[in-house]
Image: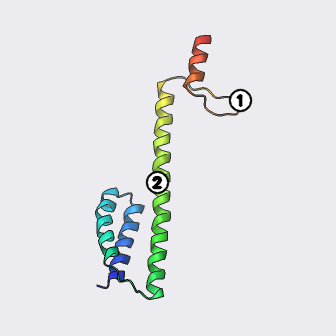
């Protein structure tokens, strides 16, 4: 198999793993992709480079979206834990007050 075809295949497998949130598979594919990229010839035709660049960009966008989703899930879990632990108040701008605001309220009560 030509090196650029191997890289395309690995990038496609990585894209599938990103979409499936299969982080174990990503961990397995990453070293293989690194090795394939190290063995890539210096001179490739423009068409092959263009295809590799498009796949890399697509994977980067997908990975960024996956990371954003993970961060949102982590924040949601923090919010749920905070709400479950007690009183949650909001300021005049509709923003959730921090723990210091809760302490001040409890002292007043």
- Can the viewer see residue 109 in this picture? no
Quick one: quadrant of the C terminus? top right
The image position of residue 100, as x and y in percent, is: 57, 22
Q: Residue at x 35, y 74 (%)?
A: 37
Task: Work out which residue is located at the far bottom of the displayed protein and give it.
Answer: 45
User: Percent x, y for residue 80?
Assistant: 48, 34
Q: Which residue is mark 1?
A: 92
Point out the tag, 1 or 2, that comes first from the N-terminus: 2
Q: Is residue 72 left or right of residue 11?
A: right
Residue drawn 60% across the image and 17% down it: 104
List the single residue furthest toward the front. 42
Q: Position of residue 87 (x, y in %)?
A: 55, 23
Badge number at residue 22: none
Left or right: residue 20 versus residue 105 is: left
Q: Which residue is mark 2?
A: 67
Distance in Å between CA atoms under marks 1 and 2: 32 Å
Depth order, front residue of 83/48:
48
Q: Nearer the viewer, residue 45 or 87?
A: 45
Quadrant position of residue 25: bottom left
Q: For the point 32% across and 79% down, which residue is it?
A: 6
In the rendered image, residue 55, in percent from the top left (x then y), is placed at 45, 74
Provide the secondary structure element on which disc 2 rests.
helix
Name the image quarter holding the N terminus. bottom left
* Picture layout, residue 69 above or below residue 60: above
Mark 2 closeness class: few <14, some 14–19, many ≥20 residues within 10 Å: few
Q: Would you place residue 57 above or below residue 24 in this image?
A: below
Secondary element under disc 1, as helix, strand or loop, is: loop
Q: Is residue 57 visible?
A: yes
């Amino acid at each position: 198999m030509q090196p650029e075809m191997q890289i395309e295949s690995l990038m496609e497998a990585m894209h599938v793993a990103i979409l499936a949130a299969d982080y174990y598979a990503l961990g397995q594919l990453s070293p293989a992709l690194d090795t394939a990229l190290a063995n890539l010839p210096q001179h490739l035709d423009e068409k092959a480079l263009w295809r590799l660049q498009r796949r890399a960009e697509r994977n980067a966008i997908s990975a960024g979206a996956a990371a954003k989703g993970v961060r949102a899930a982590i924040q949601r879990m923090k919010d749920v834990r905070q709400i479950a632990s007690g009183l949650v108040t909001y300021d005049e701008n509709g923003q959730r007050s921090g723990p210091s605001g809760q302490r001040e309220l409890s002292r007043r009560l």
